[in-house]
Image (cartoon, rainbow, N blue to C red):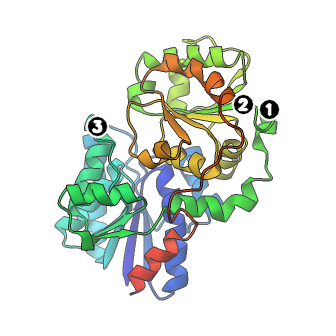
């Protein structure tokens, strides 16, 4: 079997690393190739993941870089097509919901190459989000849909996708977290910033609706307010840092730092008192780790995290950030919940077994 994996952004690496490893174990004769589209091209945002997750170096680099949604999608399709024509794989695997995902799926389908979509069926039901369009289109044209939560199966059924195309396998992002737990838990990376475990708010914000609008400065003002009660640690994307430079006053307890490597970030996450995010993957990781999560969005495509009580939607309302210390103080310190079904570190093995069969 010849398999091409198409990766483009930071979360893609985390989701695909366990699957590539599991296929290697289960089908040692399989010919696997990795295509890195370069949608995230900053070293701290992408290449370091290959080093820390043990993924083999990419066989092909498309170097599409940044641009509009149309530009990125078009570049991936133009540069991927000749590779697929030359290699003629039996399967193209695409993870997640970014522009690289839908571009690779469209390219393969038009060449009549089967497509498997990892993390299928997630829906925010907000079509103003580019990721929502990418999810819907990719699920409709993929031949195999790997689903990580039960509500995702229901979403696919409502959209008329035949049940035999969908397989409930679990969450490969949690596979990576479980596999590396012994490596990141002892790190206590927060101490590098003079912080004690369990005392600080970890922040990660990246969506254009927030960081490319005046809401970013409202969020910083609210974080300054939170920092009077608990330290705030904010690993900042280079583009966001550039927007803030000279345009926002920062409290001395609001620490803007460079993006962390995967292990270091997981350490910061596991030791946080709480996490503020607009990322889907971090909602999942905090749910598994049992860390209170606050999501600065009007909706989430991970409703299971809300149902379990580990995640609270604040809405796209930066003023509500100031409520976080009070909500944390009112939580039951003994409260805990089990992870969702099949979030057990073995999702990639289930997929490899299905492929082998």
Residue named by callout 3: 126
The N terminus - image quarter: bottom left
Crowding at dot 2, Cα within 10 Å, few <14 / some 14-19 / many 20+, comes out as many
Crowding at dot 1, Cα within 10 Å, few <14 / some 14-19 / many 20+, comes out as some
Of labels 3 and 2, earlier in sequence is 3
Label drawn at residue 47: none
Q: Are marks 3 and 1 in contact (CB under 8 Å)?
A: no
Q: CA distance from mark 3 to mark 2?
A: 31 Å
Q: Are marks 1 and 2 in contact (CB under 8 Å)?
A: yes
Residue for point 78% across, 32% down: 193
- Front in this rendered view, residue 56 or 147: 147
Residue 84 on image: x %, y %: 29, 70
Q: Please tell me whether mark 3 sits on a helix, a strand or a loop.
A: loop
Nearer the observer: mark 3 or 1; the answer is: 3
Of labels 1 and 2, earlier in sequence is 1
Residue for point 48% across, 86% down: 27
Residue 85 on image: x %, y %: 25, 72
The C terminus - image quarter: bottom left
328 shown above or below 53: above
Residue 93 on image: x %, y %: 37, 67
Residue for point 45% across, 26% down: 211
Residue named by callout 2: 200
Nearer the observer: mark 1 or 2; the answer is: 2
Residue named by callout 1: 195
Q: CA distance from mark 3 to mark 1?
A: 37 Å
- Please tell me how many numbered marks the rendered image carries: 3
Residue 16 on image: x %, y %: 48, 63
Residue for point 43% across, 61% down: 148
Inspect this view and state whether residue 77 appears: no
The reply, left or right, for residue 186 in relation to residue 160 is: right
């Amino acid at each position: 079997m010849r398999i091409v994996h198409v990766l483009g952004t930071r979360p893609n690496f985390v989701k695909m690393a366990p699957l590539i490893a599991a296929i290697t174990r289960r089908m040692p004769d399989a010919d696997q190739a990795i295509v890195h589209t370069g949608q995230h091209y900053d070293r701290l945002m992408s290449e370091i993941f290959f080093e820390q997750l043990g993924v083999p170096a990419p066989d092909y680099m498309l170097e599409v870089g940044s641009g509009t949604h149309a530009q990125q999608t078009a570049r991936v399709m133009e540069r991927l097509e000749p590779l697929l024509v030359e290699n003629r794989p039996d399967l193209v695997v695409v993870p997640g919901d970014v522009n690289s995902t839908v571009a690779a799926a469209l390219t393969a389908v038009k060449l009549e190459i089967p497509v498997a979509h990892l993390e299928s069926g997630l829906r925010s039901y907000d079509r103003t989000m580019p990721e929502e369009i990418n999810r819907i289109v990719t699920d409709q044209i993929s031949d195999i849909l790997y689903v990580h939560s039960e509500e995702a199966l229901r979403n696919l059924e409502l959209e008329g996708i035949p049940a035999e195309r969908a397989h409930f396998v679990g969450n490969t992002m949690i596979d990576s977290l479980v596999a590396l737990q012994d490596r990141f838990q002892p790190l206590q990376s927060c101490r590098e910033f003079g912080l004690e475990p369990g005392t600080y708010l970890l922040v990660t914000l990246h969506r254009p609706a927030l960081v490319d609008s005046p809401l970013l400065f409202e969020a910083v003002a609210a974080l300054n307010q939170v920092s009077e009660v608990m330290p705030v640690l904010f690993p900042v994307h280079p583009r966001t840092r550039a927007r803030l430079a000279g345009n926002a006053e920062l409290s001395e307890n609001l620490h803007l730092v460079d993006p962390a490597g995967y292990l270091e970030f997981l350490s910061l996450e596991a030791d946080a008192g709480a996490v503020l995010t607009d990322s889907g993957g971090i909602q999942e990781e905090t749910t598994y780790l049992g860390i209170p999560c606050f999501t600065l969005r009007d909706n989430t495509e991970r409703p299971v995290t809300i149902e379990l009580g580990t995640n609270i939607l604040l809405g796209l309302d930066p003023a509500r950030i100031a409520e976080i210390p009070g909500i944390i103080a009112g939580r039951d310190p003994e409260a805990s919940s089990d992870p969702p079904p099949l979030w057990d570190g073995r999702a990639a093995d289930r997929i490899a077994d299905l492929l082998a069969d």
